[in-house]
């Protein structure tokens, strides 16, 4: 056999020695309470909505530019655009594909992208692929964004990229201030609402809607609060047309399943009307947040993500194992997902957590803290 990949065993051993090696999870014991899912509204465990049109096949068969475009795609995109208050939307196969493809298609050499230090890996990779100069600024530092834009006046174009709800810290940037800075410096605002759509804002339309901010590019995910799969990019009709032509992760991928696309419309209708689930989600999150604070963590933000920062990776693994012994499934999040020295447990609330399950979670957290 070839020995060309013999170095991989050494590299894997090095990761293992640093407590950073990830392995596929073993079958989980019955009865574990899942506190690490992004299924914020509890929709993911429901069956797919009824395919109302009856004409949506399971597979697209090709890229949508070739032969894979289907009426179901248009129906889903119109529902999503209307939800977030945009003129148009375009479906992607995943959130990663949406961020990478969109940023690489929009920015180019000669441009400057101002990117938050804690932006998701898909944003980082999209910025790199674009060929633009990337100015990484401290987390949620609007003054640093302003200074970076001031230095970029000679650039061909300027872009500010941020998440609206940071999924490892559960905090929110000042979206209104970022919009004002972009307007003042003739820059485009790109906002990844992956963990906010369905959770925040009027009818769950996201944090931009809550703040009264219209980004130039809004990226939303369908695998979290919506409980399905895929992603969308919303904005103007010219934006959609450009991405249709130039977003490589869209152009060179088989289209989203038409059956899935048809299910999206019904799920959007249900999500928009489900303020009751959003209220239950907020109440569950607040209870988990209080429990983490009582256990010695510091987590003062809002929303379903409740981080418990423990420092080094071995400590996070130890506490995660202790919680599992107490019947709670919470994953240890380690570098490179989070910065070195900030390994943590990332608890997530769900709207479908029952009162007795929240009692179990609180008791388990208290016990692990002791």
Image (cartoon, rainbow, N blue to C red):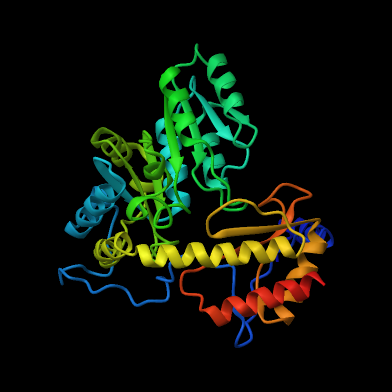
| Residue 321 can be seen in this image | no
> Left of 6 or right of it: where is 258?
left
> Left of 72 or right of it: where is 287?
right
Q: Quadrant of residue 48?
A: bottom left
Q: Quadrant of residue 273?
A: bottom left
| Residue 110 can be seen in this image | yes
Residue drawn at the location 68% of the way across and 50% of the way down: 338
- Seen as rendered, the residue at the extreme right is 17
* x then y, percent, for residue 57: 22, 69
Name the quarter where the C terminus is drawn: bottom right
> Left of 10 or right of it: where is 209?
left
Q: Is residue 343 above or below residue 349?
A: above
* x then y, percent, for residue 158: 46, 23
Taking depth in this image into account, of 93 and 139 the one nearest to the observer is: 139
Q: How many marks?
A: 0
Name the quarter where the N terminus is drawn: bottom right
* x then y, percent, for residue 340: 76, 48
* x then y, percent, for residue 182: 44, 24
Residue drawn at the location 60% of the way across and 88% of the way down: 30
Taking depth in this image into account, of 162 and 361 the one nearest to the observer is: 361
- Seen as rendered, the residue at the extreme top is 154
């Amino acid at each position: 056999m070839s020995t060309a990949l013999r170095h991989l065993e050494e590299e894997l051993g090095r990761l293992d020695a640093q407590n950073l090696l990830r392995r596929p999870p073993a079958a989980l014991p019955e009865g574990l309470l899942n506190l690490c899912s992004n299924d914020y509204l509890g929709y993911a465990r429901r069956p797919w909505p009824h395919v109302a049109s009856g004409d949506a096949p399971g597979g697209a068969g090709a890229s949508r530019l070739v032969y894979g475009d289907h009426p179901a795609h248009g129906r889903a995109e119109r529902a999503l655009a209307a939800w977030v208050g945009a003129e148009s939307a375009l479906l992607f196969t995943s959130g990663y594909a949406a961020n990478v493809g969109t940023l690489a298609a929009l920015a180019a050499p000669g441009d400057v992208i101002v990117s938050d230090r804690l932006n998701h890996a898909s944003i980082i990779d999209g910025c790199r692929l674009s060929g633009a100069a990337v100015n990484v600024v401290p987390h949620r530092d609007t003054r640093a964004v302003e200074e970076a834009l001031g230095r970029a006046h000679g650039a061909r174009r300027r872009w500010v990229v941020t998440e609206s709800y940071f999924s490892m810290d559960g905090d929110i940037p000042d979206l209104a201030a970022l919009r004002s800075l972009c307007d003042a410096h003739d820059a485009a605002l790109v906002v990844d609402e992956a963990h906010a759509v369905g959770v925040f804002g009027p009818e769950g339309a996201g944090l931009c809607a809550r703040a009264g901010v219209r980004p130039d590019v809004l990226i939303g995910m369908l695998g979290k609060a919506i409980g399905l799969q895929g992603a969308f990019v919303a904005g103007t009709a010219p934006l959609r047309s450009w991405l249709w032509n130039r977003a490589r992760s869209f152009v060179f991928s088989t289209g989203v399943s038409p059956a899935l696309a048809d299910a999206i419309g019904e799920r959007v209708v249900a999500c928009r009307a489900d303020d009751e689930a959003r209220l239950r989600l907020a109440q569950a999150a607040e209870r988990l947040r209080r429990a983490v604070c009582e256990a010695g963590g510091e987590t003062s933000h809002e929303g379903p993500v409740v981080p418990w920062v423990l420092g080094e990776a071995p400590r996070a693994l130890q506490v995660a194992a202790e919680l599992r012994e107490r019947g709670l499934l919470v994953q240890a999040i380690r570098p490179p997902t989070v910065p070195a020295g900030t390994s943590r447990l990332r608890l997530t609330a769900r709207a479908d957590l029952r009162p007795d399950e929240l009692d179990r979670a609180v008791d388990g957290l208290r016990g692990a803290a002791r």
